[in-house]
Amino acid sequence: MPDLWMGPDLFRFEQVVIERLLKPGQPGNYALGFKDESGEFIPKYIGRSDYDLRAEMIGKLGVTRYPYFKFSAVNPRIAFETECAQFHNYAKQLDNKTHPARPAGSDLRCFLCGL
């Protein structure tokens, strides 16, 4: 399975966990999903925030059904590039099917497909 570039840690997708791990105003990206029978993380939804990853993820709590998440708190350029790579690597299994949008006001393009 392709790498998510988010390290080995897996967390419960709960508000108290998100608040403990992420500080307000930190950009970054995330993957939501499940564990398979062997305990391997299966990403089903990817996303990012260019301004506040904590708020973005808390906003997903009431509208998604995923029990686990991974994240990386990085700058908007790296978050966009990582989200693009994740999207292309996992497109067939993701529930979100729209290519990641560029950061607002940026001329960045996906390094894999040019979007």
Image (cartoon, helix red, strand yellow):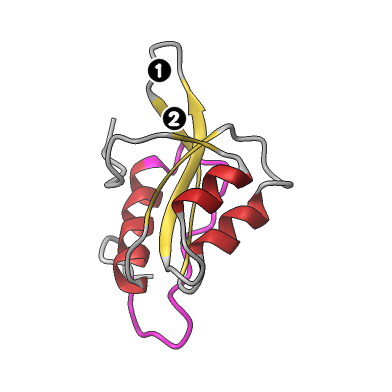
Placement of the C terminus among the 4 image quadrants: bottom left
Label 2 Cα crowd, 10 Å radius (few <14 / some 14-19 / many 20+): some
- Residue at x-position 37% and y-position 72%: 76
**Residue 74, magenta (yes or no):** no
Task: Please name whichever residue, 82 or 114, is drawn nearer the observer in this view of the structure.
Answer: 82
Placement of the N terminus among the 4 image quadrants: top left
Name the mark nearer the viewer: 1 or 2: 1
Image disc number at residue 39: 1
- Residue at x-position 44% and y-position 30%: 42
Residue 90, above or below 98: above
> Secondary structure beneath disc 1?
loop
Residue 69, above or below 57: above
Q: In the displayed image of the protein, which residue is found farthest to the top?
A: 37
Secondary structure, magenta segment, majority class: loop
Question: To which residue does mark 2 refer?
Answer: 42
The image quarter containing residue 112 is: bottom left
Name the amino acid, label 2: Ile
Name the amino acid, label 1: Gly
Answer left or right for 102 relative to 82.
right
User: Where does the image place residue 73, in percent across and percent down from the top left?
Assistant: 36, 60
- Residue at x-position 46% and y-position 57%: 22
Residue 19, above or below 77: above
Residue 87, above or below 81: above
- Residue at x-position 46% and y-position 45%: 31
Q: Which residues are magenta?
A: 90-109
Q: CA distance from mark 1 to mark 2?
A: 9 Å
